[in-house]
Amino acid sequence: MSKAESKTVSLVPAQLWGRLRKTVLALVLPVTLVWLWQLAGTDGAIAGGALPTPDRVWAAWMKWAFGTSTFGLNPYIGTWTQSLWFSAGRVVYGFAIAIAVGVPIGMIIGWSKLASAMIDPTIQWLRPVPITAWLPISIAIFGIRDFGAVFLITIGAFYPIVINTTQGTRDVDKNWIRAALMMGAGQRDVLTRVVLPAALPSIFTGLRIGLGIAWTAVIVSEMVAVKSGLGYVLWDAYYVGRMDIVIADMVSIGLMGFLSDLLIVSIEIWALRWRRLQSFDA
Amino acid sequence: MINFSKVSKVYGGAQGVRALDQVDFSVAEGEFVALLGPSGCGKSTLLNLVAGFEKLTEGEMLFDGQAVSRPGPDRGVVFQEASLLPWLTVWENVVFGPKVQGLMRNEYEPRAHEILKIVGLEAFHKALPVQLSGGMRQRVGIARALVMQPKALLMDEPFGALDAQTRLSMQQLLLEVWQRLKTTVLFVTHDIDEAILLADRVCVMTARPGRITKEIPIDLRRPRSIDDLTNSEFTHFKAQIMTEMRGAHDPH
């Protein structure tokens, strides 16, 4: 064990260098694209109004984020954080419901043949309906209130979570279940102490896909049905011709999607750390 | 302790494969019995019936006087690949049984410590299964079965996946543990040496249909050790069993 430890210690500078290199490599493409876009804009190749140059977008974004709002005449000064939290809050809310519903249902379908025969077909029939098709019914039921967006996020994130949980439950090593039964575990203990942890890798795959869909759902519903958040700003800014805000908004959405995925991945790495350790005798 | 009378197991309906055919077989309390046979002879099926993992098709099977309906802690199973729960530490794997049974900590913790000491893993109680070698993993597999104080230990080719050297040390360990606890053991193996070395009685099985063709009492002196593998008495039993198995393979 001490050998492995000393190895990690000596690895730290090399690891740091590796991470730095990775970050630099990842930045090459976006920086080049932004630079070309800036060039194209200043050379007049693209009409300044339709596609504002990066420097203008950046200026508008900074104002939107950090400007002191005056008496509410301009909605794009100092309101960025607020819009961000509206959207993020809805995503957290809807995503949490999708997990709370999707994981147990997925486990039941994967565990019981009867439940699978009864529930799975319905889910498979409903699944091809795109979240955008749920918009009218969502507005009809919930109006243009917050929960319309939450509902749409839940629907969108539910399918990948339930499907991956089902698969993960079905793939659990039969001998783990047998071992637990042999040790006197009841059905409940088998499900919570064996099947759930064993299915976690698949569940996390479902969560990551579900989270991506959740961000799509929140933007779509805010564009159409809810009067706040990044999706609402996106559409509203387009109407008043503020393409700089439109682009800043798009970048914000991408950033939030990226950061929330990073959060899920960090939780995954922590929860599944038992899978990352290497055997000593290998 | 274990009693089979005219037990058959058929997979896949009436026209299916007869894994076990009219098997009569018994294990006495405190006895160490080895089931020896080629793969596919139904020896694991027989063990799975006792464990409660599978249900018999015909006949009657009693464990401690009662029909088996489901797995339970009175029959500790040791699996071929150990089948530890990989997200739990060695200690958590060993106390899993007592914990889900709702036993009190002060009741099972001293016992778990003692058993980990017996199998030589007390220094590794915080390690995860992936951090252990195959032999060490199987020690945990044995420990988690023993900690439940089962009436019988059912071992399904527990050392089959180990390298020769590790297998020897595991056999030595099992001999020592058994000498101490004298638990009833049903041990499935395809290794003739292993069967003779460990068991009080070797039951030779043949495939298609799965039957026990010969039962050979092994009256080698106990306590035994792996040094017995080379003595003349041992060789005598080995020759006898090899003849038996050869005869079973090509019927006259």
Image (cartoon, rainbow, N blue to C red):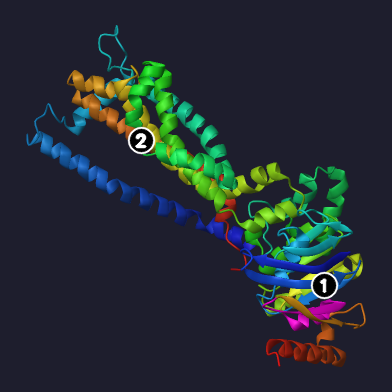
Question: Measured from the top left, where is residue B158 in percent x and y?
Answer: 72, 69
**What residue is drawn where x is 17% and y is 32%?**
A53
Q: Is residue A220 above or below residue B184?
A: above
Q: Which residue is mark 2?
A: A129
Q: Is residue A171 above or below residue B239?
A: above
Amino acid at the residue labelled 1: Asp
Report helix, strand or loop for mark 1: strand
Residue occupied by mark 1: B24
Decide which of B129, B60 is in the foreground and name it.
Answer: B60
Mark pair 1, 2: CA separation? 59 Å
Q: Residue furthest front?
A: B14
The residue at the point 56 percent across, 46 percent down is A110
Residue at image location 40% in from the left, 18% down from the top: A141
Question: Residue B157: x and y, percent?
Answer: 71, 71
The residue under the point 59% across, 46% down is A111
Q: Is residue B200 magenta?
A: yes
Asked which quadrant contains residue A69, the reply is: top left
Q: Secondary structure at mark 2?
A: loop
| Vertical comparison of B234 with A189: above or below | below
The residue range painted magenta reads: B191-209
Quadrant in which the N terminus of chain B appears? bottom right
Q: Identify the amino acid type marked 2.
A: Val
Q: Nearer the viewer, residue A39 or B35?
A: B35
Residue A270 percent location from the top left of the image: 56, 45
Give residue A74's mark: none
Dot 1: few (<14), some (14–19), or many (≥20) neighbours within 10 Å?
Answer: some
